Amino acid sequence: MSTRTVQIGSSHGLHARPAKLFAQAAKDSGIPVTIAKGDGKPVNAASILGVIALGIEQGDEVTLEATGDGADAVLDSLEHLLSLDHDAS
């Protein structure tokens, strides 16, 4: 199992569009990935509803966990995605 702590870069947090991009990337990875806000319960990162329900705002730190072959590479990719500001014009 690999773990990462990431600070959210999107200026409006993980609302619908960045949450969809993140959840789709997690799903496309082909391995189980979870995301948790603070000490909260982890949710399936491939679930857009689960991700949005966490109420993640800009600057929040989240913990990603992945299990399986290539977990570190998957987390590298997801970490990069979360650190971008998807709301910048």
Image (cartoon, rainbow, N blue to C red):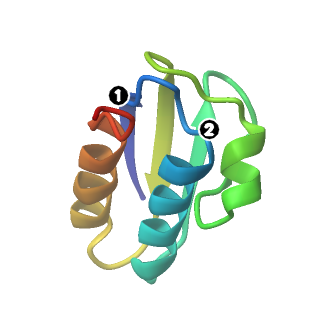
Can you tell which mark lies on residue 18? none
* Amino acid type of the residue that numbered disc 2 sits on in the rendered structure: Ala
What residue sits right under mark 1 in the picture?
A: 9
Q: Nearer the viewer, residue 20 or 72?
A: 20
Dot 1: within a 10 Å radius of its alpha carbon, few (fewer than 14), some, or many (20 or more) residues? many
Using the rendered image of the protein, determine whether residue 78 is visible from the camera's viewpoint: yes
- Residue 55: quadrant of the picture: top right
Question: In x, y percent, where is residue 41?
Answer: 75, 38
Q: Which residue is at the far top?
A: 59
Q: Quadrant of residue 25?
A: bottom left
Graded by Cα atoms within 10 Å as few (under 14), some (14 to 19) or many (20 or more), the crowding at tag 2 reads: many
Secondary-structure class at tag 1: loop
Which residue sits at x=31%, y=79%? 69
Position in image of residue 53 (x %, y %): 78, 41
Residue at which label 2 appears: 36
> Does residue 82 lie above or below 59 as drawn?
below
Front in this rendered view, residue 4 or 19 = 19
Q: For the residue marked with disc 1, what is the amino acid?
A: Gly
Residue 61: image x %, image y %?
Answer: 47, 22
Answer above or below: position of 7 versus 24: above
Measuring 32% from the left and 66% from the top, which residue is drawn there? 71
Relative to 84, is 49 above or below?
below
